[in-house]
Image (cartoon, rainbow, N blue to C red):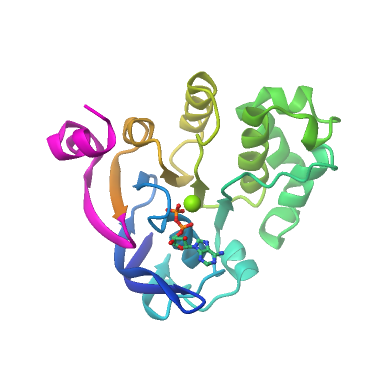
């Protein structure tokens, strides 16, 4: 479904990713793990057209996306929940979701998509008239995910789902996501390695701009080096 081959990415003059390759298959839950500054968000930027790679290929459903503009990537069926959520604070929950449905692939289905989002996150329906800025951190993350789902993506990218959230809330959101079904493929970025490995089938580890390990999440979870480096065990 998504195939990234040997990409290099720069931010200005500075190279931030080296020779990164990864694959995501339809219906999978795949995690990208790594500490702060490793290059995870830069990888999301490359996938969404914000940071076009200087080398390598990115293919989605057999079409090249390296070089596509962000709105074209959305149109192809990729949606990003950005790091820090970036909910529109002065708009209501309803309006935030409507904005997410504005891209062409979402526009004709706004009512139905909104009902789907309210099924997954019922609290958003209760709060639909409240402004985004009045929501708790967890609710804002739900809203950011809901807004991304409004464009009816086939691939949902979530950058730092759990950052700043209590473990209980994080669990609740992961639980809700498991209700999405296999028609929505999810690529998750997390600093919380344990949470990410528990909620994915496969994972890649990024260190200093390179992929250093990959494999089945349960195998990585059992790996002594990873337990020592990331789980403090
Ligand atoms: N807007 C930016 N401009 C320049 N460099 C940046 C910017 N954002 C991040 N970086 C640098 O790029 C590298 C990778 O950062 P990032 O992709 O944000 O990592 P992560 O998401 O894994 O924390 C880091 O060295 C970081 O300092
Ligand atoms: Mg980041």
Image: 2 above or below 143: below
Q: Residue at x 69, y 27 (%)?
A: 136
Q: Residue furthest top?
A: 168
- Locate residue 125: give its quadrant: top right
Q: Residue furthest left?
A: 224
Query: Camera-side residue: 143 or 102?
Result: 143
In the rendered image, residue 211 lying in the magenta stretch gets the answer: yes
Query: Camera-side residue: 144 or 23?
Result: 144
* Residue range of the region highlighted in magenta in the rendering: 207-233
Image: 46 above or below 168: below
In this view of the protein, can residue 62 be seen by the observer?
no
In the displayed structure, does residue 69 sit left or right of residue 221? right
Q: Residue at x 61, y 50 (%)?
A: 152
Question: From the image, which quarter does the N terminus lie in?
Answer: bottom left
Q: Residue 176 placed where, x, y %?
A: 53, 27
In the displayed structure, does residue 66 sit left or right of residue 140? left
Q: Residue at x 47, y 36 (%)?
A: 181
In the displayed structure, does residue 62 sit left or right of residue 207? right
Q: Residue 195 placed where, x, y %?
A: 38, 31
For the image, the number of numbered tags is: 0
Q: Residue 84 placed where, x, y %?
A: 61, 45
Question: From the image, which quarter does the C terminus lie in?
Answer: top left
- Locate residue 19: give its quadrant: bottom left
In the displayed structure, does residue 191 sit left or right of residue 155? left
Q: Residue 3 placed where, x, y %?
A: 35, 64
In this view of the protein, can residue 46 be seen by the observer?
yes
């Amino acid at each position: 479904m998504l195939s990234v081959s040997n990409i290099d990415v720069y931010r200005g003059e500075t190279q931030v990713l080296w020779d990164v390759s990864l694959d995501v298959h339809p219906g999978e839950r795949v995690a990208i793990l790594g500490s702060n500054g490793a290059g995870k968000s830069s990888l999301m930027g490359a996938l969404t057209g914000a940071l076009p790679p200087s080398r390598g290929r990115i293919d989605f459903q057999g079409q090249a996306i390296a070089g596509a503009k962000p709105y074209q990537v959305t149109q192809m069926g990729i949606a990003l929940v950005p790091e820090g959520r970036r909910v529109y604070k002065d708009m209501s929950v309803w309006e935030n979701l409507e904005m997410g449905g504005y891209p062409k692939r979402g526009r004709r289905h706004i009512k139905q998509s909104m009902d789907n989002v309210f099924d997954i996150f019922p609290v958003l329906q209760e709060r639909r008239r409240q402004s985004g800025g009045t929501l708790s951190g967890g609710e804002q993350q739900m809203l950011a995910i809901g807004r991304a789902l409004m464009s009816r993506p086939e691939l949902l990218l979530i950058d730092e789902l759990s950052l700043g959230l209590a473990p209980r809330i994080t669990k609740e959101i992961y639980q809700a996501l498991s209700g999405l079904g296999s028609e929505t493929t999810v690529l998750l970025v997390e600093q919380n390695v344990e949470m990410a490995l528990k909620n994915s089938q496969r994972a890649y580890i990024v260190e200093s701009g390179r992929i250093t390990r990959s494999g089945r999440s349960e195998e990585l979870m059992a790996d002594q080096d990873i337990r020592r480096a990331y789980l403090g065990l």
